Image (spheres, coloured by chain):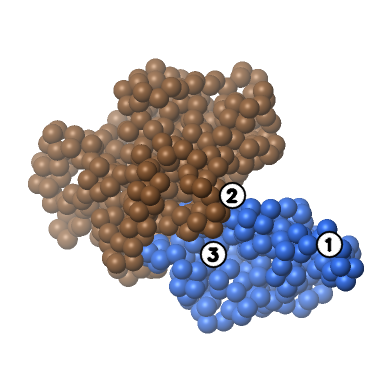
Amino acid sequence: MTQKILAAAAGLDKVEAGQLIEAKLDLVLGNDITSPVAIKEMDKIQAKGVFDKDKIALVPDHFVPNKDIKSAEHCKCVREFARRNEITNYFEVGEMGIEHALLPEKGLTVAGDVIIGADSHTCTYGALGAFSTGVGSTDMAAGMATGKAWFKVPAAIKFTLTGKPAKWVSGKDVILHIIGMIGVDGALYKSMEFVGDGIANLSMDDRFTIANMAIEVGGKNGIFPVDEKAENYIKEHSDKTYTIYRADDDAVYDAKYTIDLSALRPTVAFPHLPENTHTIDEIRQMEAIAIDQVVIGSCTNGRLDDLRTAAEVLKGRHVAKGMRCIVIPATQAIYMQAMEEGLLKTFIEAGAIVSTPTCGPCLGGYMGILAEGERCVSTTNRNFVGRMGHVSSEIYLASPAVAAESAVAGVISAPDER
Amino acid sequence: MTMSIRNYRKERSRQNVSGWIFLEQALSGANRDMNAKGTVFKYGDNVDTDVIIPARYLNTSDPAELAVHCMEDIDADFMKRVKKGDIIVAEKNFGCGSSREHAPIAIKAAGVSCVIAETFARIFYRNAINIGLPIIECPEAAKGIEAGDEVEVDFDSGVITDVTKGTSFQGQAFPEFMQKIIASEGLINYINNK
C-alpha cells in the first residue's frame, strides 16, 4: 500500500523496496522545536519562499504556551516566518492542539497523501491511509522550499489483526504488544502495514494511537486500509480530495504476523524502553509498583476516546492521596467536547488537573517534570532515561484505562481489578 | 587502498585544472574531515535522542549551547573528556526516538568526527548526513572496538582501523554524493554549491 502511494507521488507506475525516488509532497509539517532550525536552513537556501503556502502546517505545541524566554523566542521565529510567507495553516495558541491530533481533525491529512513532518510521530496519519513519516529540520526546509523529498522505498511488514479486543483493551495495548513482540528496532526502515477483519473493531482514535507508535519500532511509517469508518472520518473533517489505495493480494512482505485482538491484555511498558512490556497479569504477580504521577494525554493518547475511557474509570472516585494526575486534551476541539460531555468535571472532581493542549510533560519540557527517583504511569509514547525529568525517574507507558486506574490505586493497576 | 578524495584533490589542485574549481569549492574545508581519527567513546544498543540531547535543552537551537549537554543523561563526563576528532562507537539502533536534528548537531558541535554503529535509527541517519556528520554502519567494528581505542576511518574506502588493537573492518563506504554533502558541512550548503 505504501509502495503504491509512493509510486503515484513519484509519477511512476511501480516502485520496489530499496528504490530511491523523489516524491511530491501534499503536506510539510513542523513544530516549535524543529521549525526554527528548518527556518534557519531555509534562509540559507536562498529560496524565493515556500513552494505552496497552503501545504505547510506550522504547529507550535511542544513548549506552548511558552514555557520560558528561549521557547518564546522560538515560537516568535515560527510565527514571524508564518506571517512573512502567509502560511495558511499556522495555529496560534487558542486554535492549536498537539500537531498529530490537530491535523487530521482540521482535515489536512487524507488518504493517499504523502506527508513529511519534522516530528517523529508524523507517522500517525497512516491511520487514514496516508503515507506519512518523520524527518529532521533540514529535510523539512528542503520540503518547504521545493515541495519534494527523496525517499528510499521501504520494505513492508504485514500485521494481520483479527478478533475484537476486550472491554479495557485499546489501541495502546495493541501497539505496546507489538513493540514488545518485535522490539524497538523490529521494523527499522520498514513500513508497518495493518490488515485484517479485527481493524473494524478498532475506533479511529485506536488506529491513530497504533500508527503513532510505528516509530517506536523504528518504522518508516504505519498504515491502515481505508474502510468505511476511515472514509467517514475523512468526509466529516475534510473537503480535500482523497485517493484510496489497496495492497495487492500478492504484495511482498519481509515478515508477517497475526495478532488476535481478543487475546490481548492491558499492557504496560516498563522503563527504559517501550519494548519492556508486561501484561497486567504478569504485573499482578509482582510486588506492587507505587507511583507518584499519572499523565493522560499526548499525540498518542489525548483524543476524545482516551478521555472518555479515563473519565469512565475515574467517575465518582478520587485519585490516591499524594497522586498528581495530569490530564491534557490534545486539541481545543477535544477540550471543548470533553467539557460538554462533563468529562473535565469528572477529572477535576477526582482530584486530577486539566491542562491546555501541549506536548509538555511527554518529552520532559514542562507541566509535570519528575524529580529524582519518581515514577509515572503515562499514556505517552517513550520511556527513555530522563525523558520526563530526572535521569533516575521512571516512566511506565500504558493505556488511558490503566493510567486512570493506577491514579486511583496509587500502584500500577487495570480497571477490571475493581 | 584507492586514492582518497583528499589526495585526489591535492593532485588536481597541483595541476591547476580550471574545470575542477567547482569541485574544489564544494569540497573546500573538506580535506581535514574526509578521514577521521580519534579516541573511542563506546555505548550499547538503542542510544536514544533523549540521552543524546535531552528535550529540556531544546529551547535553544544553537549548536555550541546544545553541545554542552551532549550525552549528558547517559555519560555525564562525556563533555569533560571528549576531544576534537573523537569517535563514538555504539551497537544497534543508534539515535532512535525523536526526529530532533539537534541530536546530530550536538554530537558534531561536541567535536565528534564520526559515529560508527551496528545500525542507526532511520531519521537520525538522514539527519546526520543532512547536517554533515559522518556516520558508518559496521556491525563488526561495533562489536570489535572498545572504549578508549584509537580508531581511524577512511571515508572513501569505508575502512575502519583500530590502531590500538591493530585490527581493521570494512564499513559501508559513502557514495560520492554523500561525501560531498558531508564535505559541504550539510545538505543545504551542498545544494547552494551546486
Name the secondary structure under disc 1.
Answer: helix
Q: Of marks 3 and 2, which one's residue comes earlier in the chain?
A: 3
Mark 1 vs mark 2, foreground winner is 1
Subunit ID for the residue under disc 3: B
Query: Pointer 3 and pointer 1: residues touching (CB < 8 Å)?
Result: no
Give the CA distance from mark 1 to mark 2. Answer: 39 Å
- Image position of B173 (left or right of A71): right
Residue at 41% in and 36% down: A54
User: If the image is split into quadrants, where does the C terminus of chain A sit?
Assistant: top left
Image quarter of residue A94? top left
Subunit ID for the residue under disc 1: B
Residue A231 locus on image (x, y percent)? 39, 20
Chain A's colour is: brown
Amino acid residing under circle 2 = Arg
A281 in relation to B183, above or below? above
Residue A117 locus on image (x, y percent)? 47, 44
Residue identified by numbered label 3: B105
Residue at 73% in and 53% down: B177
- Image position of A86 (left or right of B104): left
Pointers 1 and 2 within a single chain = yes
Residue identified by numbered label 2: B122
Residue identified by numbered label 1: B18
Residue at 56% in and 73% down: B110
Name the secondary structure under disc 2.
Answer: helix
A204 in relation to A21, above or below? above
Name the secondary structure under disc 3.
Answer: helix
For the colour blue, the matching chain is: B
